[in-house]
Image (cartoon, rainbow, N blue to C red):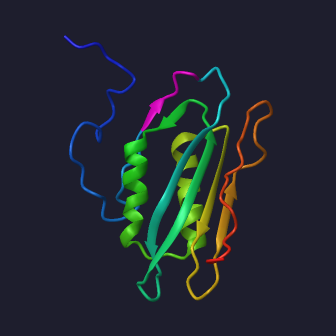
């Protein structure tokens, strides 16, 4: 007989998992926050995020930084990695990708606070940085700077 845990509802961990065909098809999983009584920040960094230009089909690359202060739920990291990977064959502008990720995580987690920084590498000579935030960070929680310098080229 096994004891029931907060992780019993997870379906992606523990085995081989195929990359979803699209962000819409991706399953994002969550687990109850065992430290719900404490306000703290969580950071996920995806320095090799890719999507496609919706007009040309050419790849676009970004460094994503996702910070959130969880309430009752935590995002399961493998499901987040697969969700982000599903953008590899998804055509959308930088703004749409970045804000869509932030909104989907908010819908899933209902966190106290969330922000995402999308630091996109230049195409056509112009980098585009996109930022989404749900409001002011909660007082008393240390929120580190995202630490991604502005694009300076090769010099």
Query: How far from the left and from the top, in percent, is residue 76?
Result: 43, 39
- In the rendered view, would you say 149 is above or below 13? below
Looking at this view, is 45 or 134 the one in front? Answer: 45
Q: Is residue 31 magenta?
A: yes
- In the rendered view, would you say 146 is above or below 143? below
Query: How far from the left and from the top, in percent, is residue 140?
Result: 79, 30
Q: Residue at x 34, y 59 (%)?
A: 25
- In the rendered view, would you say 94 is above or below 9? below
Residue projecting furthest to the front: 155
Q: Is residue 54 magenta?
A: no
- In the rendered view, would you say 12 is above or below 33? below
Query: How far from the left and from the top, in percent, is residue 59?
Result: 43, 78
Q: Residue at x 76, y 42 (%)?
A: 137
The region drawn magenta spans 30-35
Looking at this view, is 26 or 40 the one in front? Answer: 40
Query: How far from the left and from the top, in percent, is residue 32?
Result: 48, 28
Q: Is 13 situated left or right of 99 in this image?
A: left
Q: Quadrant of residue 85?
A: bottom left
């Amino acid at each position: 007989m096994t004891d029931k845990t907060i992780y019993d509802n997870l379906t992606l961990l523990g085995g081989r998992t195929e990359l979803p065909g699209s962000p819409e098809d991706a399953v994002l999983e969550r687990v109850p926050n065992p430290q719900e009584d404490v306000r703290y920040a969580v950071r996920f960094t995806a320095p090799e995020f890719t999507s496609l230009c919706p007009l040309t089909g050419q790849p676009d690359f970004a460094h994503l930084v996702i910070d959130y202060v969880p309430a009752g739920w935590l995002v399961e990291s493998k499901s987040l990695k697969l969700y982000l990977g599903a953008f590899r064959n998804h055509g959308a502008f930088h703004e749409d990708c970045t804000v869509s990720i932030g909104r989907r995580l908010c819908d899933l987690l209902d966190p106290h606070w969330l922000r995402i920084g999308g630091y996109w590498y230049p195409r056509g000579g112009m980098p585009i940085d996109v930022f989404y935030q749900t409001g002011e960070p909660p007082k008393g929680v240390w929120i580190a700077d995202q630490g991604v310098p502005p694009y300076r080229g090769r010099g």
